[in-house]
């Protein structure tokens, strides 16, 4: 009888856990600017938190001789699930999201929208077909939201600092859709 009771209790706990997971709300994009909302018909496949760094380089401004600016070189971040478990990486160029199972996607930027001061903009990208089979297979869009940090350095970028690279810390949620 004890064994049966334990199995019933375990089954109830498993059912309750399944219900809690099934009822957890999907990412709500209603508060996002229209430009970075994912088109209807796509559903959230994975929510990740990217924690890492963005590299900038002091370069000549395009078509403006004698003027300089900090130019985005690329990101390098760990992608964690909502529980904090590493599930992949984000790096570039080109911008690449790679799951721990080896599957990966690159993407084309569709839109950006300003974030709070001191934070990189929100972003919407359209994913290219995945490489490999796994978590990234079938990803259609990726949103970058809840950004913290990551903006170009505030230090001077001029002829004396041309070619200098600076690394800044950042964090962002990457919401992936299928």
Image (tube, rainbow, N blue to C red):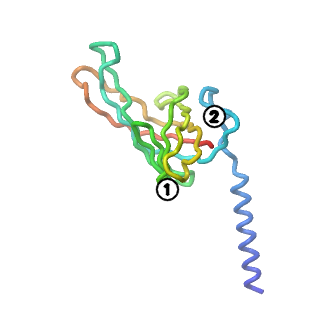
Relative to 77, residue 19 above or below:
below
**Residue drawn at the location 32% of the way across and 26% of the way down:** 155
Of residues 32 and 107, the one nearer the viewer is 107
From the image, which quarter does the C terminus lie in? top right
Relative to 132, residue 150 above or below:
above
Report which residue position mark 2 lands on.
38
Q: Is residue 107 left or right of residue 24?
A: left
Of residues 89 and 80, the one nearer the viewer is 89
Relative to 28, residue 163 above or below:
above
* SS at badge 1: loop
**Residue drawn at the location 65% of the way across and 36% of the way down:** 29
**Residue drawn at the location 55% of the way across and 51% of the way down:** 135
Q: What is the x, y in percent for residue 31? A: 66, 32
Residue 88's label in the rendered image is none
Instruction: Using a 10 Å C-alpha cutoff, classify the residue at mark 2 as few (fewer than 14 neighbours), some (14 to 19) or many (20 or more).
Output: many
Report which residue position mark 1 lands on.
101
């Amino acid at each position: 009888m004890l064994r049966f009771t334990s199995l019933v209790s375990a089954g109830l706990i498993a059912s309750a856990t399944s219900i809690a997971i099934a009822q957890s709300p999907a990412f709500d994009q209603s508060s996002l600017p229209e430009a970075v909302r994912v088109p209807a018909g796509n559903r959230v496949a994975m929510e990740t938190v990217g924690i890492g760094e963005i590299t900038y380089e002091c370069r000549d401004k395009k078509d403006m001789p004698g003027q300089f600016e900090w130019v985005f070189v690329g990101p390098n971040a760990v992608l964690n699930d909502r529980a904090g478990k590493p599930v992949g990486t984000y790096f570039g160029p080109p911008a690449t999201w790679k799951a721990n199972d080896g599957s990966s996607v690159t993407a084309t930027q569709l839109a950006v929208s300003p974030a709070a001061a001191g934070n990189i903009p929100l972003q919407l990208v359209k994913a290219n077909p995945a490489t490999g089979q796994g978590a990234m297979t079938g990803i259609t869009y990726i949103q970058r939201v809840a950004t913290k940090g990551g903006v170009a350095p505030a230090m001077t970028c001029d002829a004396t600092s041309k070619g200098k690279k600076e690394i800044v810390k950042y964090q962002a949620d990457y919401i992936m859709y299928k």
